[in-house]
Amino acid sequence: MRIDALTLEGFRNYEKECLSFDPNCNVIYGENAQGKTNLLEAIVYLSCGKSPRARTDRELIGFDKEHATILGEITSRERSFKTEIQLSRGKRRKMTVNGVTAKNSTALSDVLHTVFFCPEDLFLIRDGAAARRRFMDLSLCQLRPRYAEALAEFNRLYEHKTRILRDSEDYPQLLQTLPDFNERLCQVGAVLIHYRARFCEALRDYAAQAHSECSGGKEELSLHYQTVKTVIDPFAPHQELVSKLMEHQATHYEAEIASKLCLSGPHKDDIEVTVNGRSARQFCSQGQVRTAALALKLAEREIHKNAIGEYPVMLLDDVLSELDPKRQEYVLNRIAGGQVFITCCENDRLDTLLHGKVFHIKDGEVV
């Protein structure tokens, strides 16, 4: 799986740029705020219809532009694809794969998978639960189309319920609709728990091996998926999960109305990470935290490979500069075998990286 060429027009700070890539390694260097990360962001968007940085599509369109286009020429499953995404202010985006309209991001994920790793991910362990949920969501939306659909529906229902709770003091009759929203939230939430639990199980196995290798066998990494307390077994059948979520929701019904907040559901899920039996978030050193984060990202890559039969495109955004030489060497050795993009600020170390193409980015252009 690889991206052979990319055309950007009106995307972030790119006026118009057409690039062709090496099938193995592509090094992108330049000073800060020149567009290196924007380039990787466009590739991620081609794979899942979501940005790892922006909250809305409007943020992806250049400041003085009304439209933006991302066009990728991709090789996947020994076939050639052209994925095109058109973004417009005030209009719905348009997505096509080989000229056929893509109704949702599932069609994009059927063609391209990516694993994006940025410096902020090195603090994935110490960040709040929202960061680890986002990590699961971005990966699972590419891996499982049913998950992407369920997550989108859950978010819509969650927003509706939040508005109902917020406005219920002025419009008490809105509370009559709450039971229907709660029931559907539990049904869709059970789907999220089903996939997240299995993803964490696979992640645990691969990440434990990667962490052990990177630490020289001195440390043992473990992961535990955490969801609402009433769900004792997240691998239980769907209807049992629904029943347990309904049970948890019922105990929080009055508190939700009083606080006007959604207090029950998998929107608060987390991954507990331990090293040698201790909470990595609380007790690990900075080096241990970074090793654990590396292990999670490398494990994510292996999960995608097992699911699709090919390595996903690996995107390393200025990560190497944040790592000591030992971890740099470990990462570079582990990512061999698939296409990789590496961004960095300086080019004086490029000869020590993998062989491939080198791009110098300045003001949204290759110079």
Image: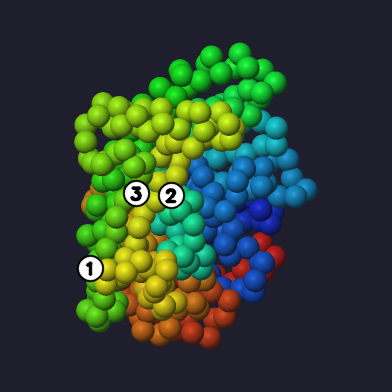
**Residue at the disc numbered 2:** 133
Cα–Cα span, label 2 and label 3: 11 Å
Q: Residue at x 27, y 63 (%)?
A: 222
Residue type at tag 1: Gln
Cα–Cα span, label 1 and label 3: 22 Å
**Residue at the disc numbered 1:** 209
Q: Position of residue 42 (x, y in %)?
A: 54, 52
| Residue 267 marker | none
Q: Position of residue 236 (x, y in %)?
A: 21, 36
In the foreground, 267 or 140:
267
Residue type at tag 3: Gln
Q: Is residue 152 left or right of residue 276?
A: right
Q: Residue at x 63, y 22 (%)?
A: 168
Residue type at tag 2: Arg
Q: Residue at x 36, y 66 (%)?
A: 279
**Residue at the disc numbered 3:** 226
Q: Is residue 100 above or below residue 132?
A: above
Q: How many marks?
A: 3
Helix, strand or loop for disc 3:
strand
Q: Is residue 321 above or below residue 177?
A: below
Residue 248 visible in the snapshot: yes
Q: Is residue 92 left or right of residue 127?
A: right
Q: Position of residue 265 (x, y in %)?
A: 42, 36
Q: Is residue 236 left or right of residue 56?
A: left
Residue 150 visible in the snapshot: no
Q: Along the polypeptide, which appears first: circle 1 or circle 2?
A: 2
How dense is the environment of label 1, judged by Cα within 10 Å: few (below 14), some, or many (20 and up)? Answer: some
Helix, strand or loop for disc 1:
helix
Q: Nearer the viewer, mark 2 or mark 3?
A: 3
Helix, strand or loop for disc 2:
helix
In the foreground, 53 or 41:
53
In the foreground, 324 or 278:
278
